[in-house]
Image (spheres, rainbow, N blue to C red):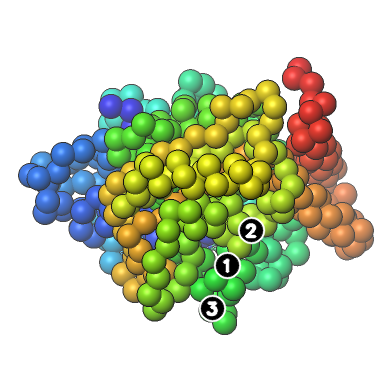
Amino acid sequence: MQEIVSIYIGKAGILLGEAVWELYCMEHGILINGNMPSYESETDFKFTNFFQQVRPAKFVPRALFFDLEPTYTNKLRNGKHRFLFNSEQFLTGDDDAANNFITDRYNSGSEIIDSMIETVRNFTNNCENVEGFIIYHSAGGGTGYCLTALLMERLRNDYPKKMFTEFSIYPTPIISPITTEPFNAVLSTLTSSEYSDCCFIVDNEAMYQMCCSNLLMKNPNYTNLNRLIAQTVSSATISLRLESALNSNLKELQKNLVPLPRLNFPYATYAPVVPGDKIYDITVEQLTKSCFSKENQMVKCNPEYGKYLGCCLQFRGNVEPTEINLAIKAMREENSFELVDWCPSAFKVGVNLRKPSFLPNSDLAELERTACVLSNNTNIGDYLTRLNQKYNILESKNDFVCWFKMQNIEFAEYKEAYDFLNQLISDYEEVDLDIYQVD
Ligand SMILES: Nc1nc2c(ncn2[C@@H]2O[C@H](COP(=O)(O)OP(=O)(O)OP(=O)(O)O)[C@@H](O)[C@H]2O)c(=O)[nH]1
Ligand SMILES: [Mg+2]
């Protein structure tokens, strides 16, 4: 058994975690108290890499929740999933970093970090052979950025052979008015490059627009966003939780998506995103096409540009392999996607025949088949350039810079992260132009 431990940090991480585990439980026939009524008839027990079996038909998520303050962990512990988790899976301080990286790092974060490491250690001691960690957090939040950075630095050191995957939620002023978030997001990108094998960017702006345009919501809230992200995360991880010929573990996922270690920022596209009240049937060809359309991307990047360094198309539900072959052939004939020349095997396809599950009162139409593309495409450079521009606008506003400059060391760190971001953008550009040099 190769266990995968999920870690949720800060408010966004924890609230997303709640939506993700609600969906995982439904998918594996586990009730909100951890009991599995269909235990006797279950045939595929691979999911126990995500759920610890504590009694024959009772399961506990392999998940940990960390925050500097207790509001959101308390919400989860006292909410409808209170019997799903144990108290050892939560650790909080009693502070809030108010989106301030420096306060976090040097005060509350450094106080709690040793206890976090001990919590992870105790948890992994109950596992046979942990394959790796999946870490969920916001890149813009003080805790989401800083505590994650501290934790990853320490875990990388303590678990050098394990895989580290992230789902990192990037900020947008449309839903969060906190002006310093692009600073934290730039820093977070550097941390992900240093410590993560594979960091999926989740852009809140793209998620918000998907809720408005595809799901016809007027004012989507975080619950709506999280439920949509959870659906995508579930498709991205289904091959890890059930027997699968494609991406059956974190190592293979990373190998398929990150052929060059520095360029480790893939994103996901999920389809179809259509409202729950719609009666909808979709052909495999339409489904495949929607998986490569801008409207369904978790990060807005122009799909007409860019080359794939890696691309995994994962179908779920009632899908025939012959239909898939025809759909891919049609796409190839349209010449609508381009792979980097040096990696012609970068396009992979997987199918999981189980019908996809949907959360109760799902915003999404409950369909017989869905698909998800995980891709590392040079067009992520568009998004990183926009992040860079946000950083520049912020930097040009003197108020913040004065404040940061007073803290010499920290400003140097911001500068290093900013330079790194520019390098990353130009690396992706060079791959696109086929002039990238591997060092
Ligand atoms: N998708 C999603 N984004 C969220 C959610 N909550 C907050 N965010 C985003 O996360 C960023 C703020 O980070 P939080 O996670 O709220 O804060 P934190 O990590 O707890 O850090 P502190 O500032 O120290 O409290 C902003 O960009 C928010 O838009 C959520 O439930 N879902
Ligand atoms: Mg917080």
Residue appearing at x 46%, y 45% in the figure: 326
What is the spatial separation of the Cα atoms under label 3 and label 1, in whole angstroms? 9 Å
x 40%, y 51%: residue? 234
In this rendering, the answer to whether 70 lies above or below 154 is below
Q: Identity of the amino acid at label 2?
A: Lys
Type of amino acid under label 1: Met
Cβ–Cβ under 8 Å for marks 3 and 1: no
Q: Position of residue 86 (x, y in %)?
A: 27, 50
Mark 2 and mark 3: span between their CA atoms? Answer: 17 Å
Q: Residue at x 61, y 57 (%)?
A: 293
24 on left or right of 391: left
Q: Residue reaching furthest left?
A: 40
Which-is-in-front pick, marks 2 and 3? 2
Q: Which residue is mark 2?
A: 294
Kind of element beneath mark 3:
loop
Q: Report which quarter residue 21 is drawn in.
A: bottom left
- Amino acid identity at mark 3: Leu
Residue bearing the label numbered 3: 216
The quarter in which the N terminus is drawn is: top left
Q: Measure the alpha-carbon separation of dots 1 and 2.
A: 10 Å
Q: Nearer the viewer, residue 397 or 43?
A: 43
Q: Is residue 16 visible?
A: no
Q: Which residue is mark 1?
A: 210
Q: Is residue 318 left or right of residue 35?
A: right
